[in-house]
Amino acid sequence: MKSFDFIFPTRMRVGADRMQELGVTAREYGTHAFVVLDPFLKGSQTAASILEDLRQNGVEHTVYYDVMPNPRNTMIDEGIVLCRAAKCDVVVVVGGGSAIDTAKAIALVAVHGGTCWEYTERAGETVQRPSTPGLPLIVCPTTAGTGSETTACAVINNPSEVRKCTIINPVIYPTVSIIDPKIMLSVPPLLTALTGIDTFAHSFEAFICSGSNAISDMFALRSMELFAQNIRTAVQNGSDVEARSQLAMSCAMGGAALFNAGVCLPHALGQPLSAFTDAPHGGTLAACLPQVIEWTLPYAQDRFARVAEIMDPMGVQGMTIEQKAYQLPKIMHALYQDLDVHVSFSGYGLKLDDLDAFIELCFTAFRQDIEKHPKPVTRENIREVLEMCM
């Protein structure tokens, strides 16, 4: 049997209306919360209810709304200063993946000191990797996409260096994740589609990469099944609570799979695209998944075939493993048509003149992902795939 470790310490509270438990949960861990809220919540009744719930449960709060997609290192560092100045003893976050990654970094660095960028993984550079946790962290995701509620990763964008790197450390796992599909009902169709594809990418990459193992496979396969069964309904009818619930579970399972198995080439391409163009993470993955699959074949045929069976069981019925595997790019393109997703690297603003610097960033910040891809990858290979994605 293949040797592996599997870590998942986060306490999960899952179900409709579980957000009502936020104040009680926060009080278990502290009396002054640093509350990171997605900017779309500012001035909303939802934000007012969250803060009142904390207040009613004896939890003071300092509120922080300065979150951007692809969170900036400088803004996170400002949050760290505010958190420490207010002497907060617990961090609460309600928002999407960028808000959650921001909160993870604040919770860690508020205790251990320095700047958040010092904790990101960068090949050949000094990295801070503490072995003890930061502040307790309570996470409430508002989208079913990033899986950040069940991972020990926090992705940070450094515009001054045109780099996007990741804190990867088990000590930043959320203490508690409250997953309530009702808070996701207002997510618009395109964002539902792109965050859903993000979820699929996490599970897919965890399943095909060299770090996959028996337990991560279990999470990844079930995550992809829930995605395939519910993504079209959630995009076409956002008020369907059951479809939202199933996608939320798909997302959480995908996060658990990816942190324990890893990801591979799609993330090694998608993350740098966000650094260069500020494109949304789900969109960057959507813009390269079919191309990476096509380029990778015939490697990992058995795994690609299994995914094709999940995504289109009737369409691949009776085919050989090889035939099923080669159907997968077509299945993905058909899904994009159904979800009205039309994305490309050039559409997000990447220019051919950027490719040399882009490839360098792939190998500096995301080498560990490249090395886990089932097919060996060289710099020239990346250029080839990038040109396919343009």
Image (tube, rainbow, N blue to C red):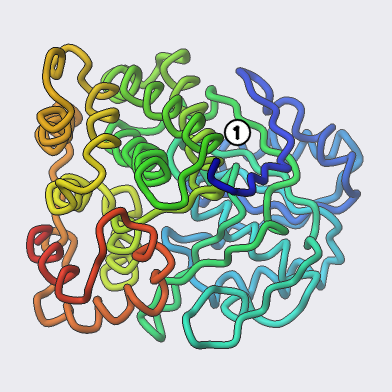
The residue pinned by badge 1 equals: 45
Q: Residue 209 at x, y = what percent?
A: 38, 50
Which residue is at 84% across, 40% downward? 55
Is 380 on the left or on the right of 6, as rendered? left
Quadrant of image for the N terminus: top right
Residue 42 visible within the image: no
Is 295 on the left or on the right of 10, as rendered? left
Farthest residue, direction front: 1
| Quarter holding residue 313 | top left
Q: Between residues 53 and 148, which one lies in front from this camera angle?
A: 148
Q: Between residues 287 and 178, which one lies in front from this camera angle?
A: 287
**Dot 1, how many residues are within 10 Å of its Cα: few (below 14), some (14-19), or many (20+)?**
few
Q: Amino acid at mark 1?
A: Gln
| Quarter holding residue 377 | bottom left
Which residue is at 42% across, 45% downward? 206
Q: Between residues 225 and 50, which one lies in front from this camera angle?
A: 225
